[in-house]
Image: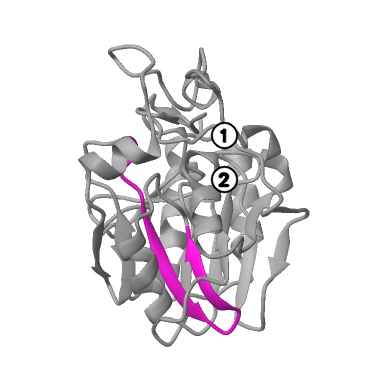
Amino acid sequence: MDCFICNTCGTQYAPSAHPPAHCAVCEDERQYVGWNGQTWTTHDALRDRYALRIEEDDGLLGIGLPVEFAIPQRALLLPTDAGNILWECVSLVTPEVVDMLKARGGVDCIAISHPHFYSSMVEWSEAFGGVPILLHEADRRWVMRPSPCIHFWEGEEKALSADVTLVRCGGHFPGSTALHWKRGPRSGGALFPGDAMQVASDRRHLGFMYSYPNYIPMKPGDVRAMRARLAAYDYTDIFGFTWGRNIIEGARAAADVSFERYLHAVSD
Protein backbone atom coordinates (compact mmCIF):
# COMPACT_ATOMS: atom_id res chain seq x y z
CA MET A 1 0.00 0.00 0.00
CA ASP A 2 1.09 3.56 -0.68
CA CYS A 3 0.72 6.79 1.25
CA PHE A 4 -0.72 8.85 -1.59
CA ILE A 5 0.14 12.55 -1.87
CA CYS A 6 -2.17 15.18 -3.32
CA ASN A 7 -0.57 16.91 -6.31
CA THR A 8 -2.29 20.22 -5.56
CA CYS A 9 -1.70 20.72 -1.83
CA GLY A 10 1.09 18.20 -1.17
CA THR A 11 -0.69 16.47 1.74
CA GLN A 12 0.29 12.85 2.35
CA TYR A 13 -2.54 10.46 3.30
CA ALA A 14 -2.61 7.26 5.34
CA PRO A 15 -1.59 4.02 3.57
CA SER A 16 -4.22 2.67 1.17
CA ALA A 17 -4.43 0.27 -1.77
CA HIS A 18 -5.90 2.95 -4.03
CA PRO A 19 -5.76 6.77 -4.13
CA PRO A 20 -8.44 8.45 -1.99
CA ALA A 21 -11.56 9.59 -3.81
CA HIS A 22 -11.17 13.15 -2.54
CA CYS A 23 -8.63 15.44 -0.89
CA ALA A 24 -10.41 17.00 2.08
CA VAL A 25 -7.74 19.69 2.33
CA CYS A 26 -8.26 20.85 -1.25
CA GLU A 27 -12.06 20.67 -1.05
CA ASP A 28 -12.04 23.10 1.87
CA GLU A 29 -12.77 26.71 0.83
CA ARG A 30 -9.27 27.82 1.88
CA GLN A 31 -7.70 25.63 -0.83
CA TYR A 32 -8.86 24.36 -4.22
CA VAL A 33 -8.98 21.21 -6.33
CA GLY A 34 -6.49 21.32 -9.21
CA TRP A 35 -7.78 22.66 -12.50
CA ASN A 36 -7.39 19.22 -14.07
CA GLY A 37 -9.27 17.54 -11.23
CA GLN A 38 -8.03 15.57 -8.27
CA THR A 39 -4.72 13.82 -8.97
CA TRP A 40 -2.29 11.92 -6.79
CA THR A 41 1.36 10.94 -6.61
CA THR A 42 3.52 8.93 -4.22
CA HIS A 43 6.67 9.65 -2.28
CA ASP A 44 8.73 7.37 -4.53
CA ALA A 45 7.35 9.08 -7.64
CA LEU A 46 8.23 12.49 -6.21
CA ARG A 47 11.77 11.30 -5.48
CA ASP A 48 12.15 10.12 -9.08
CA ARG A 49 10.86 13.39 -10.51
CA TYR A 50 12.20 16.15 -8.26
CA ALA A 51 15.30 17.19 -6.39
CA LEU A 52 14.97 19.15 -3.19
CA ARG A 53 16.15 22.74 -3.17
CA ILE A 54 18.62 23.19 -0.29
CA GLU A 55 20.06 26.63 0.37
CA GLU A 56 20.39 29.41 2.89
CA ASP A 57 17.46 31.81 3.27
CA ASP A 58 18.57 34.92 5.18
CA GLY A 59 20.88 32.94 7.42
CA LEU A 60 18.81 29.78 7.93
CA LEU A 61 18.97 26.50 6.03
CA GLY A 62 15.91 26.12 3.83
CA ILE A 63 14.46 22.98 2.23
CA GLY A 64 11.84 23.07 -0.51
CA LEU A 65 10.43 21.55 -3.67
CA PRO A 66 10.29 23.24 -7.09
CA VAL A 67 7.52 25.82 -7.30
CA GLU A 68 5.54 23.84 -9.87
CA PHE A 69 4.63 21.21 -7.27
CA ALA A 70 1.81 21.89 -4.80
CA ILE A 71 2.21 24.89 -2.45
CA PRO A 72 5.71 26.39 -2.66
CA GLN A 73 6.49 26.55 1.07
CA ARG A 74 9.96 25.82 2.37
CA ALA A 75 10.96 24.27 5.65
CA LEU A 76 13.65 25.86 7.85
CA LEU A 77 16.12 24.27 10.23
CA LEU A 78 16.23 26.29 13.45
CA PRO A 79 19.25 25.55 15.71
CA THR A 80 17.70 26.67 19.01
CA ASP A 81 18.18 26.01 22.72
CA ALA A 82 15.19 23.66 22.38
CA GLY A 83 17.22 21.57 19.93
CA ASN A 84 17.17 21.54 16.16
CA ILE A 85 13.61 22.35 15.11
CA LEU A 86 12.37 21.69 11.60
CA TRP A 87 9.88 24.51 11.12
CA GLU A 88 7.25 23.61 8.51
CA CYS A 89 7.45 20.58 6.25
CA VAL A 90 7.50 19.56 2.60
CA SER A 91 6.23 16.54 0.70
CA LEU A 92 9.59 14.94 -0.16
CA VAL A 93 12.38 13.68 2.08
CA THR A 94 15.54 12.14 0.62
CA PRO A 95 18.43 10.17 2.16
CA GLU A 96 20.87 12.85 1.02
CA VAL A 97 19.02 15.58 2.90
CA VAL A 98 18.64 13.38 5.98
CA ASP A 99 22.40 12.77 6.01
CA MET A 100 23.09 16.48 5.56
CA LEU A 101 20.80 17.42 8.46
CA LYS A 102 22.30 14.70 10.65
CA ALA A 103 25.72 16.23 9.98
CA ARG A 104 24.29 19.46 11.43
CA GLY A 105 23.06 17.71 14.56
CA GLY A 106 19.88 16.14 13.20
CA VAL A 107 16.27 17.13 13.89
CA ASP A 108 14.91 17.00 17.44
CA CYS A 109 11.31 17.96 16.66
CA ILE A 110 9.07 19.22 13.88
CA ALA A 111 6.68 22.14 14.38
CA ILE A 112 4.20 23.19 11.70
CA SER A 113 2.13 26.35 11.39
CA HIS A 114 -1.07 25.01 9.82
CA PRO A 115 -2.59 22.11 7.82
CA HIS A 116 -1.53 23.32 4.36
CA PHE A 117 2.06 22.59 5.35
CA TYR A 118 1.54 19.22 7.06
CA SER A 119 2.60 17.60 3.76
CA SER A 120 4.76 14.49 4.46
CA MET A 121 5.37 15.31 8.13
CA VAL A 122 5.21 11.66 9.26
CA GLU A 123 7.72 10.67 6.56
CA TRP A 124 10.10 13.34 7.90
CA SER A 125 9.59 12.31 11.51
CA GLU A 126 10.29 8.66 10.78
CA ALA A 127 13.43 9.57 8.84
CA PHE A 128 14.83 10.94 12.11
CA GLY A 129 13.74 8.08 14.33
CA GLY A 130 10.20 9.21 15.11
CA VAL A 131 10.87 12.71 16.46
CA PRO A 132 7.77 14.51 17.79
CA ILE A 133 5.59 16.56 15.46
CA LEU A 134 3.98 19.49 17.30
CA LEU A 135 0.55 20.56 16.01
CA HIS A 136 -2.21 22.60 17.57
CA GLU A 137 -5.17 20.60 18.83
CA ALA A 138 -7.64 22.90 17.06
CA ASP A 139 -6.48 21.57 13.68
CA ARG A 140 -6.53 17.87 14.57
CA ARG A 141 -9.23 17.10 11.96
CA TRP A 142 -6.84 17.99 9.12
CA VAL A 143 -4.31 15.26 9.94
CA MET A 144 -4.67 12.85 7.02
CA ARG A 145 -1.90 10.43 8.02
CA PRO A 146 -2.21 9.73 11.78
CA SER A 147 0.90 8.71 13.70
CA PRO A 148 2.01 8.28 17.32
CA CYS A 149 4.75 10.79 16.45
CA ILE A 150 2.13 13.57 16.35
CA HIS A 151 1.74 15.49 19.61
CA PHE A 152 -1.12 17.97 19.89
CA TRP A 153 -0.81 21.00 22.13
CA GLU A 154 -3.61 23.16 23.46
CA GLY A 155 -4.14 26.73 24.59
CA GLU A 156 -2.68 30.01 23.43
CA GLU A 157 1.03 29.24 23.71
CA LYS A 158 3.49 26.45 24.34
CA ALA A 159 7.02 27.18 25.56
CA LEU A 160 9.57 24.76 24.12
CA SER A 161 12.49 26.39 25.95
CA ALA A 162 13.56 29.72 27.41
CA ASP A 163 13.95 31.05 23.87
CA VAL A 164 11.31 29.28 21.77
CA THR A 165 7.54 29.58 22.09
CA LEU A 166 4.70 28.41 19.87
CA VAL A 167 1.84 30.93 19.76
CA ARG A 168 -1.67 30.20 18.52
CA CYS A 169 -2.53 33.02 16.14
CA GLY A 170 -5.77 31.65 14.67
CA GLY A 171 -7.38 33.40 11.73
CA HIS A 172 -6.26 31.37 8.72
CA PHE A 173 -7.01 28.15 10.62
CA PRO A 174 -8.24 27.95 14.24
CA GLY A 175 -4.90 26.47 15.27
CA SER A 176 -2.66 28.57 13.00
CA THR A 177 0.61 28.82 14.86
CA ALA A 178 3.61 31.16 14.88
CA LEU A 179 6.99 30.25 16.30
CA HIS A 180 8.81 32.96 18.25
CA TRP A 181 12.58 32.53 18.62
CA LYS A 182 13.84 35.00 21.19
CA ARG A 183 17.56 34.90 20.43
CA GLY A 184 17.96 34.05 16.83
CA PRO A 185 19.09 33.83 14.19
CA ARG A 186 20.10 37.48 14.76
CA SER A 187 19.93 39.58 17.88
CA GLY A 188 16.44 40.94 18.45
CA GLY A 189 14.64 37.68 17.76
CA ALA A 190 12.52 36.31 14.95
CA LEU A 191 8.89 35.40 14.28
CA PHE A 192 7.86 32.57 11.96
CA PRO A 193 4.10 33.05 11.35
CA GLY A 194 3.43 30.62 8.49
CA ASP A 195 0.27 31.88 6.78
CA ALA A 196 -1.28 33.48 9.87
CA MET A 197 0.20 36.63 8.42
CA GLN A 198 1.98 36.67 5.08
CA VAL A 199 4.91 38.83 4.05
CA ALA A 200 3.83 41.02 1.13
CA SER A 201 5.81 41.34 -2.10
CA ASP A 202 7.20 44.69 -1.00
CA ARG A 203 8.71 42.93 2.07
CA ARG A 204 7.66 45.92 4.17
CA HIS A 205 4.13 44.84 5.07
CA LEU A 206 2.07 41.79 5.95
CA GLY A 207 -1.31 40.56 4.74
CA PHE A 208 -4.06 38.62 6.52
CA MET A 209 -6.21 36.19 4.55
CA TYR A 210 -8.58 33.38 5.45
CA SER A 211 -7.92 31.96 1.97
CA TYR A 212 -4.95 33.11 -0.07
CA PRO A 213 -5.72 31.32 -3.38
CA ASN A 214 -9.43 32.17 -3.21
CA TYR A 215 -8.96 35.75 -1.95
CA ILE A 216 -11.13 35.57 1.16
CA PRO A 217 -9.97 38.16 3.70
CA MET A 218 -9.53 37.32 7.34
CA LYS A 219 -12.21 38.48 9.76
CA PRO A 220 -11.25 41.72 11.55
CA GLY A 221 -11.97 40.10 14.90
CA ASP A 222 -9.47 37.33 14.15
CA VAL A 223 -6.84 39.89 13.17
CA ARG A 224 -7.38 41.85 16.38
CA ALA A 225 -7.10 38.63 18.40
CA MET A 226 -3.86 37.75 16.60
CA ARG A 227 -2.42 41.18 17.31
CA ALA A 228 -3.28 40.80 21.00
CA ARG A 229 -1.70 37.33 21.22
CA LEU A 230 1.54 38.53 19.61
CA ALA A 231 1.75 41.85 21.45
CA ALA A 232 4.07 40.55 24.17
CA TYR A 233 6.68 39.25 21.74
CA ASP A 234 9.54 41.32 20.35
CA TYR A 235 11.26 40.40 17.11
CA THR A 236 13.51 42.05 14.56
CA ASP A 237 12.90 39.61 11.70
CA ILE A 238 9.88 37.83 10.23
CA PHE A 239 10.42 34.74 8.09
CA GLY A 240 7.53 34.16 5.71
CA PHE A 241 6.24 30.95 4.18
CA THR A 242 8.59 30.68 1.19
CA TRP A 243 11.98 31.66 -0.14
CA GLY A 244 12.91 35.31 0.30
CA ARG A 245 9.51 36.30 1.72
CA ASN A 246 11.16 37.71 4.84
CA ILE A 247 11.35 41.06 6.57
CA ILE A 248 14.85 41.44 7.94
CA GLU A 249 15.23 44.27 10.46
CA GLY A 250 12.26 46.35 11.57
CA ALA A 251 9.79 43.46 11.37
CA ARG A 252 7.91 44.27 14.58
CA ALA A 253 7.25 47.82 13.40
CA ALA A 254 6.15 46.45 10.00
CA ALA A 255 3.71 44.10 11.72
CA ASP A 256 2.25 46.88 13.87
CA VAL A 257 1.73 49.09 10.82
CA SER A 258 0.24 46.18 8.85
CA PHE A 259 -2.30 45.33 11.56
CA GLU A 260 -3.49 48.94 11.54
CA ARG A 261 -3.49 49.19 7.75
CA TYR A 262 -5.53 46.02 7.33
CA LEU A 263 -8.10 46.88 9.98
CA HIS A 264 -8.54 50.34 8.44
CA ALA A 265 -8.95 48.85 4.96
CA VAL A 266 -11.72 46.44 6.00
CA SER A 267 -13.59 48.87 8.23
CA ASP A 268 -16.79 50.64 7.24
- Residue type indicated by callout 1: Lys
Let me know if residue 253 appears in the view.
Answer: no
Asked whether the beta carbons under mark 2 and mark 1 sit within 8 Å of each other, the answer is yes
Residue at 47% across, 35% down: 11
Residue 159 in the image: x percent, y percent?
70, 72
Q: Is residue 160 left or right of residue 107?
A: right
- Residue type indicated by callout 2: Val
Residue 226 in the image: x percent, y percent?
60, 52
Residue 210 in the image: x percent, y percent?
50, 33
Residue at 61% across, 60% down: 130
Let me know if residue 32 appears in the view.
Answer: yes
The boundaries of the magenta stretch are: 70-87
Residue 41 in the image: x percent, y percent?
36, 28
Instruction: Name the disc covering residue 219, or none.
Output: 1
Q: Is residue 29 above or below residue 220?
A: above
> Label 1 neighbourhood size at 10 Å, few (<14), some (14-19), many (20+)?
some
Q: Is residue 81 magenta?
A: yes
Q: Is residue 266 above or below residue 188?
A: above
Residue at 26% across, 57% down: 243
Instruction: Name the disc covering residue 45, or none.
Output: none
Q: Which residue is mark 2?
A: 223
